[in-house]
Structures are given as C-alpha cells and as structure tokens.
C-alpha cells in the first residue's frame, strides 16, 4: 500500500511542484495558481488536523506537509518516517525535519495527554509520597527511581533520555516545581 502511494506521489511530483510553493525557512506551502475550490494564488495550502499535522489535499488524496517538504527539498519522497525535531508537528521548516526509523521517531514523542506531573516520564507513585521516573526502552517500561521532588525525577528522566536516545532525545521544558 505504501509503495503504491509512493509510486502515485512520484507521478504527481511535477504537478505538485507546479501548483505549490514551499518556503523552507517558514515551512509554509502556498498555492501558485487559483484552484477550483476557491483557493487563490498565494493562499496558504493545507489545514491542521487534530494532531497538529498540516494536511494538503491534492487530487482527492491527503498529503502530509512534512513529507511534501522533504520531497520539495531533496527531490524524492522520504522512504522512512519524518521526525519534527522540536516536537511541533505543524513546524515544517526543513531545518526541523529529519528522516528516521519509526522507533527513532517514537523516542522524540512528547508528554502523554494524561500527564499530570508537568514533566515527561514522571508520575506520582501510588502512595502519593514520591515521584517516579520511568522510560520506555525497546517496548518495556524501565523505572529510573523515586524522588522527593518531581524536578529531581525529571532530571533522572532527561539524563536517561540523553544516554539512551542521543540525538532523538526531546528537550523537556523545566517548569516551576512546587511539588514536595
């Protein structure tokens, strides 16, 4: 299926490049020509989906803008996943994009939606007295220890993330730690 999509996208490559302009410094696509669907020359192409990715409609298909940006700059469709280095899925500047394996892409994931600590990889233990740092390695949850403050658990997580994930470690914002 993915191979068929790549073949189709390769056939459309010249057409896409003739109707879209990509600004690699801003990561924004604009239409070069007026389109039937009331899009005018210079209008921003695409819409943001619920996960923050920019989707561009073309010939009845939805194309992710980050994959399209890769093709515009490097001349071919990516064969692997495309990672947004800064974690912002709508930031399609070429400097923010890198080709990677699915596993590497998962290393750069942000906080889960149910995170209540404010720190990636940190949760309150069941007894409510200490903060636990955990990291996922090869699909298994590894506990990094328990700490009196959430910021201490976060420091342990960030160190482990740096050691295990290297360039795919995500920068975690340090928030105010009022939790004792």
Image (cartoon, helix red, strand yellow):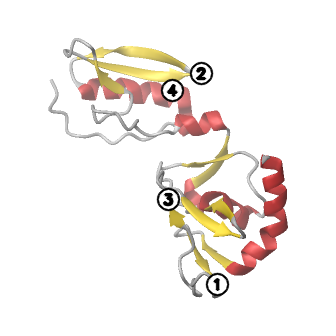
Instruction: Find numbered disc 1 in the image and state the secondary structure of the residue it sits on.
Output: loop
User: Label 2 to label 4, Cα distance in Å?
Assistant: 14 Å
N-term-proximal mark, 3 vs 2: 3
Q: Quadrant of the C terminus?
A: top left
Q: Look at discs 2 and 4 and give the one toward the viewer.
A: 2
In the image, 46 versus 156, the foreground residue is: 46
In the image, 107 versus 127, the foreground residue is: 127
Above or below, 126 relative to 18: above
In the image, 66 versus 47, the foreground residue is: 47
Q: Position of residue 126 (x, y in %)?
A: 26, 14
Q: Which residue is mark 2?
A: 138
N-term-proximal mark, 2 vs 4: 2
User: Label 3 to label 1, Cα distance in Å?
Assistant: 23 Å
Above or below, 90 relative to 23: above
Q: Position of residue 36 (x, y in %)?
A: 64, 84
Q: Which residue is mark 3?
A: 90
Q: Which residue is mark 4?
A: 163
Dot 2 and dot 1 residues touching (CB under 8 Å) = no
């Amino acid at each position: 299926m993915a191979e068929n999509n790549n073949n189709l996208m390769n056939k459309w490559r010249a057409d896409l490049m003739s109707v879209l302009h990509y600004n690699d410094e801003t990561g924004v696509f604009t239409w070069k020509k007026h389109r039937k669907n009331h899009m005018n020359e210079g209008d921003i192409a695409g819409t943001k989906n619920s996960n923050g990715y920019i989707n561009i409609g073309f010939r009845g298909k939805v194309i992710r803008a980050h994959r399209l940006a890769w093709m515009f700059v490097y001349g071919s469709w990516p064969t692997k996943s495309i990672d947004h280095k800064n974690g912002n899925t709508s930031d399609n500047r070429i400097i923010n994009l890198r080709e990677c394996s699915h596993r590497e892409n998962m290393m750069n994931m942000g906080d889960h939606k149910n995170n209540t600590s404010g720190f990636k990889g940190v949760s309150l233990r069941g007894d409510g007295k200490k903060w636990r740092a955990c990291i996922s390695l090869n699909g298994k949850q590894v506990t990094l220890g328990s700490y009196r403050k959430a910021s201490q658990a976060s420091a342990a997580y960030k160190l482990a993330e740096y050691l295990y994930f290297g360039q795919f470690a995500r920068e975690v914002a340090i928030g105010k730690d009022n939790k004792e």
